[in-house]
Amino acid sequence: MFNFNGELFSKDREILNYNNRGFKYGDALFETIRCINGNVFFWEDHYFRLMSSMRILRMEIPMEFTLEFLEEEIKKVVANNGLENTAARVRLTIFRKDGGLYSPITNDVSYLIEVGTLESPFYLLSSDSYEVELFKDYFVNKDMLSNLKTTNKILNVVAGVYAQENGYENCILINNDKQVVEVINGNLFLVKDNAIKTPPLSDGCLDGIIRKKLIEIIKKTEGLELQEDSISPFELQKADELFITNSISGIRPITKYRKKDYRNSTGKSLLGKLNAKARIDQF
């Protein structure tokens, strides 16, 4: 079942029509969230990012869209899918209501919540081979819209097709200045000695929830130095480790880029701290 504007429908029910603005113009935002045993992970961070993004896109925020209201709407659809005692993946999509061309006739919004199962209640570190390549056909813009989690993701889609066609698990995206920004489905971190580097938001990367949490962890970890700074593609093969972060996988080590093979000891250590932070967040 899924939740559309507070009402539950079976998965085979057709709700959205041809005039939907998310479909026609990508006029939508979304959050992908972990829900474990009925607890929504890092919910405050997801909520405040969503509210901030709605303001930036000039969407009207309904009075009932409180932290508590949306959390209960998520839990309602999780429970009605029988996932309240296990690990669930939640997607909350907000889109402007139908009407208009590029200029909408209303800034009022609708929401849709869908859920699926997850393999584990904890973030796990995969040891599988994970090879990536630089995607250079199109570029991420260096502006605030690139920081938002919108449904305008055609660059990511084309990069995903490129990865499939060439046998890669993922692609690294770059901006117009040819600086590394992120990967198709998350933020990127580079480890060199005791320094951990990630691109700044001003370079156009997604303002990721796990990126934010990991930055907090690294700053508090003795012996590690955080650097939010631009990354040149030339730095990638000089790194000791590369890893990806997102709300579903947590930390995903990259094992190979071109001729360079990477270790994952720092990523493994940080994953334990991230799991601990996620548990503390629930209390």
Image (cartoon, rainbow, N blue to C red):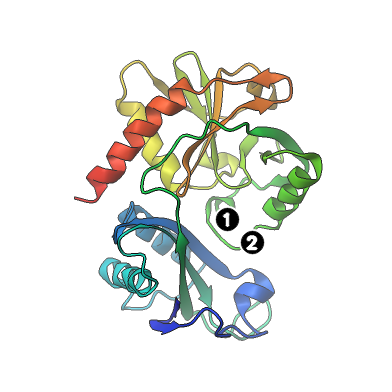
Residue that carries the numbered disc 2 in the rendered image:
152
Quarter of the figure that contains the N terminus? bottom left
Q: Where 177 falls versus 71 (above or below)?
A: above
| Spatial CA span between label 2 and label 1 | 10 Å
Residue at the image point whose x is 34% and y is 58% from the top: 86
Is label 2 in a helix, a strand or a loop?
A: loop
The kind of residue on which mark 2 rests is Asn
Q: Are marks 2 and 1 in contact (CB under 8 Å)?
A: yes
Q: Looking at the image, which residue is at 47% across and 74% down? A: 112
Q: Is residue 184 visible?
A: yes
Residue furthest toward the top? 193
x and y percentages locating residue 55 in the rendered image: 44, 65
> So how many labels did they put on this image?
2
The numbered dot on residue 241 is none
Residue displayed at 32% across by 32% down: 273
Q: Position of residue 28 (x, y in %)?
A: 56, 69
Q: Nearer the viewer, residue 86 or 70?
A: 86
Name the residue carrying label 1: 145
The quarter of the picture where residue 153 lies is bottom right
- Judged left or right of residue 59, residue 62 is left
Which residue is situated farthest in the left direction here?
A: 283
The label nearer to you, 2 versus 1, is 2
